[in-house]
Image: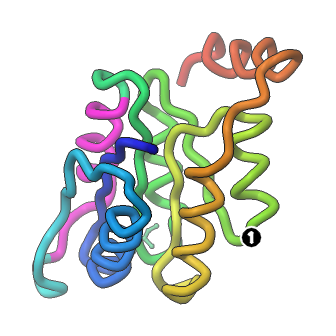
């Protein structure tokens, strides 16, 4: 079972709640949930990305989930942080491969792009897939060594 840090900006509060509920229902642990409670509380997504990435980096073995309108801004911001490999995912194959080949440790989803049903499936796929290691470990090490 995974231990998760989940965050959203104002554009994805509802999806954040959906994903927290889905993760808990599947037996995962939500260690922290960050982001506004009211859609009127506009917040800059890089600030939430920074908080979630800091937690993922300093709490080994945990994974992050970042949701905003498209997932793109969260991923761009997250990938600036040390030790973070964030992937925007729109389909189940990519959700699986991002873990299996790229050892992604942050899943980014867009609340204005995917519906709640697909988002739950993408989360479930991401969390149930393990990194394959082997030749992929060498490639991931090169990503990490390349800095931001
Ligand atoms: C907020 O309007 C929106 O720009 C943000 O949620 C996200 O989609 C950025 O990538």
Q: Position of residue 133 (x, y in %)?
A: 77, 21
Question: Does 50 appear in magenta?
Answer: yes
Q: How many marks?
A: 1
Classify residue 111 as left or right of residue 36.
Answer: right
* Residues packed near mark 1 inside 10 Å, few (<14), some (14 to 19) or many (20 plus): some
Q: Residue at x 48, y 23 (%)?
A: 83
Q: Residue at x 30, y 84 (%)?
A: 14
Q: Colour scheme used in the picture? A: rainbow
Classify residue 117 as left or right of residue 96.
Answer: left
Decide which of 90, 146 is in the foreground and name it: 90
Q: Which quadrant is the N terminus positioned in?
A: top left
Q: Position of residue 48 (x, y in %)?
A: 26, 52
Residue furthest right in the image? 135
Classify residue 144 as left or right of residue 116.
Answer: right
Residue 90 occupies quadrant? bottom right
Q: Position of residue 134 (x, y in %)?
A: 84, 16
Q: Position of residue 66 (x, y in %)?
A: 41, 57
Q: Residue at x 23, y 42 (%)?
A: 51
Decide which of 43, 17 is in the foreground and name it: 17
Write down the region rendered in magenta: 42-56
Q: Secondary structure at mark 1?
A: loop
Question: Does 146 appear in magenta?
Answer: no
Residue 72 occupies quadrant? bottom right
Classify residue 35 as left or right of residue 91.
Answer: left
Decide which of 48, 107 is in the foreground and name it: 107
Q: Main secondary structure of the magenta part?
A: helix
Q: Residue tagged by mark 1? A: 91
Decide which of 63, 48 is in the foreground and name it: 63
Q: Is residue 66 above or below residue 113?
A: above
Q: Is residue 106 above or below residue 146?
A: below
């Amino acid at each position: 079972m995974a231990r998760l840090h989940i965050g959203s900006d104002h554009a994805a509060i509802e999806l954040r709640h959906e994903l927290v509920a889905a993760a808990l229902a599947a037996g995962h642990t939500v260690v922290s949930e960050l982001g506004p409670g009211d859609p009127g509380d506009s917040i800059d997504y890089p600030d939430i990305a920074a908080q979630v990435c800091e937690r993922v980096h300093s709490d080994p073995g945990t994974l992050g989930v970042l949701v905003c309108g498209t997932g793109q801004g969260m991923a761009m911001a997250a990938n600036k942080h040390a030790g973070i490999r964030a992937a925007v995912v729109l389909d189940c194959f990519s959700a699986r491969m991002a873990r299996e080949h790229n050892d992604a440790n942050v899943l980014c989803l867009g609340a204005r792009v995917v519906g709640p049903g697909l988002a739950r499936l993408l989360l479930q796929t991401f969390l149930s897939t393990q990194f394959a290691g082997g030749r992929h470990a060498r490639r991931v090490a090169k990503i990490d060594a390349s800095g931001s």
